[in-house]
Structures are given as C-alpha cells and as structure tokens.
Amino acid sequence: MIQVTRLNGKSFTLNALYIEVIESFPDTTITLTNGHKYVVKENEQEVRTKISSFYRNINVLSLRKDSEVLEDE
C-alpha cells in the first residue's frame, strides 16, 4: 500500500498492486485495473518511487544487481 494525497490535501492509502497507469495531465492521475481514477498531488516520479519501495518491501522486486552483496564466486 502507498500513501498519496488528494488535491484537497487529504491523504489516503492505495493498493499499489492494482495500479495500471500513472499519467500527468499536468496533475498526476492514477488509473487502477478496475478503471477507477485518482488525481493526486504527488508527481509521477514520486508515485513510481513509492510503488517501487512498496514492491521491495513485500519482496515482489529483488535488489538491483549493483546493490546486491555478492557471495563467493
């Protein structure tokens, strides 16, 4: 889950697993797989960073190769 902010300043939590599209119109609009759309204050890059962090926290994404600790080769 990621926390984002509506344009009126109220924050809410969104399940990042259901995000299908993130667009800037110039406001950032998040479209879910069910078609619901949310306009948020965060820019597109901030939302992508939050999603990436969420995926790493639940072990959907592994660490990058350049940041992994290499064991005996």
Image (cartoon, helix red, strand yellow):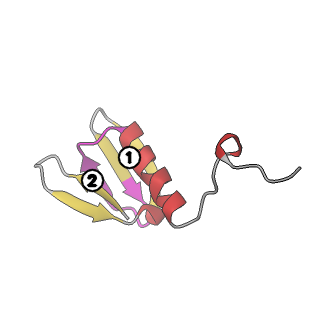
Image-quadrant location for residue 10: bottom left
Q: Is residue 62 left or right of residue 6?
A: right
Amino acid type for the residue under numbered disc 2: Val
Q: Is residue 51 left or right of residue 61?
A: left
Q: Which residue is mark 2?
A: 4
Q: Residue 56, how many percent across, how many down?
A: 53, 58
Residue at 29% across, 58% down: 3
Amino acid type for the residue under numbered disc 1: Val
User: Residue 61, relative to residue 34: is it above or below?
Assistant: above
Residue 33 is at least partly visible in this image: no
Mark 2 touches mark 1? (CB < 8 Å): yes
What span is in magenta?
A: 31-44
Q: Which residue is mark 1?
A: 47
Number of marks in the image?
2
Query: Between residues 65 and 54, which one lies in front from this camera angle?
Result: 65
User: Residue 67, relative to residue 72: is it above or below?
Assistant: above
Q: Residue 28, how many percent across, how many down?
A: 31, 41
SS state under label 1: helix
Query: Between residues 24 and 54, which one lies in front from this camera angle?
Result: 54
Residue at 28% across, 64% down: 13
Q: Residue 16, how many percent across, how many down?
A: 43, 61
Q: Is residue 30 left or right of residue 51?
A: left
Question: First in sequence: mark 2 or mark 1?
Answer: 2
Which numbered marker is on residue 16? none
Q: Is residue 50 left or right of residue 58?
A: left
